[in-house]
Image (cartoon, rainbow, N blue to C red):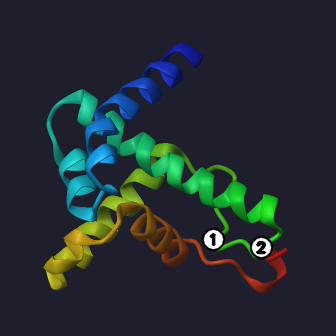
Amino acid sequence: MWSTFLSGTIIACLAMSNVAHAAAMTVGDLKDFCTATDAKSRVACRFFIYGVVQGIGLSAGKLGDTELFCLPDSLSMAAMESTVKLAIEQDLAFFPKDSGLEASGFVGAAMMMAFPCQEEDRR
Protein backbone atom coordinates (compact mmCIF):
# COMPACT_ATOMS: atom_id res chain seq x y z
CA MET A 1 0.00 0.00 0.00
CA TRP A 2 2.73 2.46 0.98
CA SER A 3 4.78 1.63 -2.08
CA THR A 4 1.77 2.40 -4.29
CA PHE A 5 1.18 5.64 -2.40
CA LEU A 6 4.83 6.63 -2.61
CA SER A 7 5.07 5.72 -6.29
CA GLY A 8 1.94 7.70 -7.03
CA THR A 9 3.22 10.71 -5.14
CA ILE A 10 6.52 10.65 -6.98
CA ILE A 11 4.80 10.27 -10.35
CA ALA A 12 2.44 13.14 -9.55
CA CYS A 13 5.30 15.40 -8.52
CA LEU A 14 7.31 14.56 -11.61
CA ALA A 15 4.35 14.97 -13.91
CA MET A 16 3.56 18.39 -12.50
CA SER A 17 7.13 19.62 -12.16
CA ASN A 18 7.23 21.18 -15.63
CA VAL A 19 4.02 23.08 -14.96
CA ALA A 20 5.23 24.26 -11.55
CA HIS A 21 8.33 25.88 -13.04
CA ALA A 22 6.44 27.80 -15.70
CA ALA A 23 3.48 28.97 -13.62
CA ALA A 24 0.86 27.66 -11.24
CA MET A 25 -1.24 24.79 -12.55
CA THR A 26 -4.45 26.06 -14.09
CA VAL A 27 -7.89 24.50 -14.15
CA GLY A 28 -7.30 23.73 -17.83
CA ASP A 29 -4.04 21.94 -16.99
CA LEU A 30 -5.77 19.93 -14.27
CA LYS A 31 -8.60 19.04 -16.62
CA ASP A 32 -6.05 17.77 -19.14
CA PHE A 33 -4.39 15.59 -16.49
CA CYS A 34 -7.74 14.29 -15.25
CA THR A 35 -9.09 13.42 -18.70
CA ALA A 36 -5.90 11.96 -20.15
CA THR A 37 -5.81 8.28 -21.01
CA ASP A 38 -2.36 7.50 -19.63
CA ALA A 39 -1.95 6.24 -16.07
CA LYS A 40 0.71 8.81 -15.10
CA SER A 41 -1.59 11.73 -15.87
CA ARG A 42 -4.50 10.17 -13.99
CA VAL A 43 -2.27 9.61 -10.95
CA ALA A 44 -1.05 13.20 -11.20
CA CYS A 45 -4.67 14.38 -11.26
CA ARG A 46 -5.63 12.36 -8.20
CA PHE A 47 -2.60 13.29 -6.12
CA PHE A 48 -2.75 16.97 -7.03
CA ILE A 49 -6.35 17.10 -5.80
CA TYR A 50 -5.54 15.08 -2.69
CA GLY A 51 -2.52 17.27 -1.93
CA VAL A 52 -4.51 20.48 -2.22
CA VAL A 53 -7.30 19.14 -0.02
CA GLN A 54 -4.83 17.93 2.62
CA GLY A 55 -2.84 21.17 2.43
CA ILE A 56 -5.90 23.32 2.98
CA GLY A 57 -6.99 21.15 5.88
CA LEU A 58 -3.55 21.21 7.50
CA SER A 59 -3.08 24.93 7.08
CA ALA A 60 -6.47 25.67 8.66
CA GLY A 61 -5.58 23.49 11.63
CA LYS A 62 -2.07 24.89 12.09
CA LEU A 63 -3.14 28.51 11.70
CA GLY A 64 -6.22 28.14 13.88
CA ASP A 65 -8.44 29.25 11.02
CA THR A 66 -11.98 28.09 10.47
CA GLU A 67 -12.17 24.95 8.38
CA LEU A 68 -13.23 25.70 4.82
CA PHE A 69 -14.89 22.34 4.20
CA CYS A 70 -15.82 19.31 6.27
CA LEU A 71 -15.06 16.01 4.60
CA PRO A 72 -16.71 12.78 5.67
CA ASP A 73 -14.20 10.45 7.34
CA SER A 74 -14.92 7.79 4.74
CA LEU A 75 -14.29 10.04 1.71
CA SER A 76 -11.82 8.35 -0.62
CA MET A 77 -9.29 9.93 -2.95
CA ALA A 78 -11.36 8.65 -5.86
CA ALA A 79 -14.42 10.46 -4.51
CA MET A 80 -12.40 13.68 -4.11
CA GLU A 81 -11.23 13.32 -7.69
CA SER A 82 -14.77 12.71 -8.96
CA THR A 83 -16.05 15.74 -7.07
CA VAL A 84 -13.44 18.04 -8.58
CA LYS A 85 -13.71 16.58 -12.10
CA LEU A 86 -17.48 17.13 -12.07
CA ALA A 87 -17.02 20.69 -10.81
CA ILE A 88 -14.50 21.39 -13.59
CA GLU A 89 -16.82 19.95 -16.22
CA GLN A 90 -19.82 21.93 -15.00
CA ASP A 91 -17.91 25.19 -14.55
CA LEU A 92 -16.11 25.15 -17.89
CA ALA A 93 -19.34 24.35 -19.74
CA PHE A 94 -20.65 27.78 -18.71
CA PHE A 95 -17.44 29.70 -18.05
CA PRO A 96 -14.74 28.46 -20.45
CA LYS A 97 -12.38 31.29 -19.49
CA ASP A 98 -12.19 29.79 -16.00
CA SER A 99 -9.72 27.29 -17.49
CA GLY A 100 -7.05 29.91 -16.77
CA LEU A 101 -7.79 30.06 -13.02
CA GLU A 102 -5.33 28.53 -10.56
CA ALA A 103 -6.22 24.89 -10.05
CA SER A 104 -5.50 24.83 -6.32
CA GLY A 105 -8.03 27.56 -5.58
CA PHE A 106 -10.59 25.85 -7.79
CA VAL A 107 -10.09 22.54 -5.97
CA GLY A 108 -10.65 24.28 -2.63
CA ALA A 109 -13.79 26.01 -3.90
CA ALA A 110 -15.15 22.76 -5.34
CA MET A 111 -14.67 21.01 -2.00
CA MET A 112 -16.29 23.92 -0.14
CA MET A 113 -19.35 23.67 -2.38
CA ALA A 114 -19.58 19.89 -2.14
CA PHE A 115 -18.78 19.53 1.57
CA PRO A 116 -19.81 22.67 3.46
CA CYS A 117 -19.34 22.71 7.20
CA GLN A 118 -22.31 23.08 9.48
CA GLU A 119 -21.91 25.55 12.37
CA GLU A 120 -21.41 22.69 14.84
CA ASP A 121 -18.60 21.30 12.60
CA ARG A 122 -16.55 24.49 12.67
CA ARG A 123 -13.72 24.90 15.18
Identify the disc placed on residue 69: 1
Q: Nearer the viewer, mark 2 or mark 1?
A: 2
Q: Position of residue 93 (x, y in %)?
A: 15, 78
Does 43 sit above or below residue 19?
A: above
Does 30 sit above or below residue 27?
A: above
Quadrant in the picture for the N terminus: top right
Q: Position of residue 46 (x, y in %)?
A: 39, 43
Q: Residue at x 33, y 37 (%)?
A: 17
Label 2–label 1 contact, CB within 8 A: no
Q: Position of residue 51 (x, y in %)?
A: 52, 46
Q: Residue at x 61, y 51 (%)?
A: 54
Extreme residue in the top direction: 3
Q: Residue at x 16, y 79 (%)?
A: 97
Q: Residue at x 44, y 40 (%)?
A: 47
Q: Secondary structure at mark 1?
A: loop
What's the amino acid at mark 1?
Answer: Phe
